[in-house]
Image (tube, grey):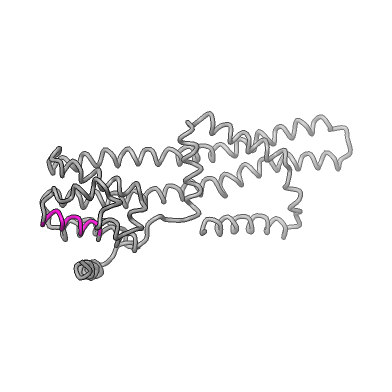
């Protein structure tokens, strides 16, 4: 919702200042200019990116309305899930984890944390990370490489929509100039007409330049930056899982493995060491 507030501030500042200077907002509303600029931008995106990336742009833009996907509570649940799984593996051996990673929906540990269970991507990443260790397919020192390959691929896929939207944003002032030139061409065709009509057509042409710059720097560029921040937040969540898995598979105690993960979190979402200790005690008592 912060994105909506920001968009309101942009509109209010630009249009409010224009009105205060004696301008008429209606003079900026020219459907033909919107069609030229918006249509050119949409066409450029279709040329530039495959269907999956275009869908990704739409999804990530909607995601900016929700804000960062993970808060402190989400990380607390994640660390507790990891701790309980690691403790089970320590007590019953790695084979004891097999039923939990094969059927996470039926896991009595994972199902205790419904918000985490709803995150299909994170659940799949956790289970896929544990599975080769449980099956003995990889050694502990090989797990880091395995997980990093998956993380690097996700970073690339998440950044593609941001990259395309940034390129379109950079092109918007150029599309605005195209609309302005077309407006001037129309004006030259009516150069012998009344001065008021010529002035109106010149004003319409200049609106094209205004719209291109306004949309680029007021909305598309900030949206692309916001999408990038949200992608970083999602990656931090998966990296938290990766760090704890690598530590645990390398022989660290469960508490130490999740402490490694905790220390890699940002200050805003990182539970303190004491908070984590209290949560672990509560989990033990509940068990």
Q: In which quarter of the image is residue 129?
A: top left
At 13% from the left and 44% from the top, the residue drawn is 140
Q: Which of 31 and 92 is in front in this view?
A: 92
Q: Nearer the viewer, residue 188 or 140?
A: 140
Residue 82 in picture, x, y percent from top left: 23, 56
Give the quadrant of the C terminus.
Answer: bottom left
Q: In which quarter of the image is residue 186?
A: top right
Total marks drawn?
A: 0
At 24% from the left and 42% from the top, the residue drawn is 147
At 13% from the left and 42% from the top, the residue drawn is 141
At 88% from the left and 32% from the top, the residue drawn is 192
Magenta stretch holds residue 87: yes
Residue 146 relative to residue 53: left or right: left
Extent of the magenta region: 81-91
Residue 107 in picture, x, y percent from top left: 25, 54
Residue 74 in picture, x, y percent from top left: 34, 60
Residue 4 relative to residue 186: left or right: left
């Amino acid at each position: 919702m912060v994105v909506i507030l920001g968009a309101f501030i942009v509109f209010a500042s630009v249009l409010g200042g224009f009105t205060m200077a004696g301008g008429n907002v209606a003079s900026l509303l020219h459907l033909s200019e919107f069609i030229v600029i918006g249509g050119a931008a949409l066409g450029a995106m279709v040329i530039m990116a495959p269907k999956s990336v275009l869908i990704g742009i739409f999804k990530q833009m909607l995601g900016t309305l929700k804000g960062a996907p993970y808060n402190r509570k989400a990380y607390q649940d994640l660390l507790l899930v990891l701790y309980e799984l690691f403790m089970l593996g320590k007590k019953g051996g790695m084979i004891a984890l097999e039923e939990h990673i094969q059927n996470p929906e039926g896991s009595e540990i994972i199902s205790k944390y419904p918000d985490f269970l709803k995150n299909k991507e994170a659940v799949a990443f956790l289970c896929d990370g544990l599975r080769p260790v449980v099956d003995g397919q990889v050694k502990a020192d090989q797990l880091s490489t395995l997980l990093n390959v998956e993380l690097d691929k996700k970073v690339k896929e998440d950044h593609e929509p941001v990259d395309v939207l940034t390129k379109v944003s950079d092109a918007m002032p150029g599309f605005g100039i195209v609309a302005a030139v077309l407006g001037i061409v129309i004006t030259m065709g009516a150069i012998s007409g009344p001065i008021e009509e010529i002035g109106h057509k010149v004003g319409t042409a200049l609106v094209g330049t205004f719209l291109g710059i306004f949309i680029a720097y007021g909305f598309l560029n900030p949206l692309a930056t916001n999408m990038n921040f949200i992608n970083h937040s999602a990656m931090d969540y998966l990296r938290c899982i990766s760090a704890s898995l690598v530590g645990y598979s390398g022989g660290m105690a469960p508490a130490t493995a999740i402490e490694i993960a905790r220390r890699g979190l940002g200050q805003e979402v990182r539970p303190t060491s004491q908070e984590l200790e209290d949560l672990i005690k509560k989990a033990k008592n509940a068990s």
